[in-house]
Amino acid sequence: MNELASQLGISKKTIYKHFKTKDELITKGVRFIIDKYLHEVDKILKTTQDPLERIILIQKNSLKYLIYFNPSFLYGIKKYYKNAAIVFEKFKEKFIESKLKPLLKEAVEKEYLCQNLNIDLFCYLYFLKLQNLVFEPKNLIDMYCEEDVFKLIVINSLKGYITPNYKDTNRLFS
């Protein structure tokens, strides 16, 4: 709280007028960032019709936000701010269920992706566990460029299920 007060140029007392606890402050901060993220996702969904392109753009944005959060912040939330951690985890699960999974199903229905794609497993490995893949046990962003990490985790995982019916393979997956 001292650091936050210093950064904002206000007293801790002023902060506590608006937030009863540090947990409440962090939880509202996480919700604010989630709302901002969802606004950006809505823009993607409005400007793009291709389900695979939507997934790629959404996941590129997701990675950007994970990097913004950084591993120590995410770890701190999990360890010290249970309410914020619950908000973040529930958001991820609901978002995958309501946005990403339907896009994968649409891509399978349009025969852009193989019919034998295990959508639940794919969502678990490449969407729900994205932060684990990127940050654990080592922070891959510190070791490799963001674009390489993104291509390996997101692009190549989708590319493995592309069918010949998908016409934009070269544009999205080259």
Image: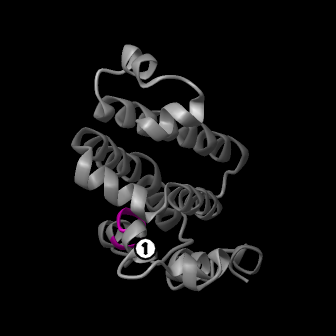
**Can residue 22 be found in the magenta stretch?**
no
The correct choice, above or below, for 59 with respect to 90 in the image is below
The correct choice, above or below, for 109 with respect to 141 in the image is above
Quarter of the N terminus within the rendering: top left
Residue 159 visible here:
no
Q: Which residue is mark 1?
A: 135
The residue type indicated by label 1 comes to Phe
The correct choice, above or below, for 2 with respect to 115 in the image is above
Residue at horizontal 37 percent and vertical 20 percent from the top: 16
17 on left or right of 4: left
Residue at horizontal 41 percent and vertical 67 percent from the top: 131
The quarter holding residue 173 reads bottom right
The quarter holding residue 20 reads top left
Task: Provide residue 105's location: percent of width, then percent of height.
Answer: 44, 60
132 on left or right of 67: left
Residue 96 visible here:
yes
Read off the magenta span.
125-129
Q: Nearer the viewer, residue 159 or 111?
A: 159
Q: Nearer the viewer, residue 54 or 28?
A: 28
Quarter of the C terminus within the rendering: bottom right
Q: Rate crowding at label 1 as few (under 14), some (14 to 19) or many (20 or more) other CA atoms within 10 Å.
A: some
71 on left or right of 7: left
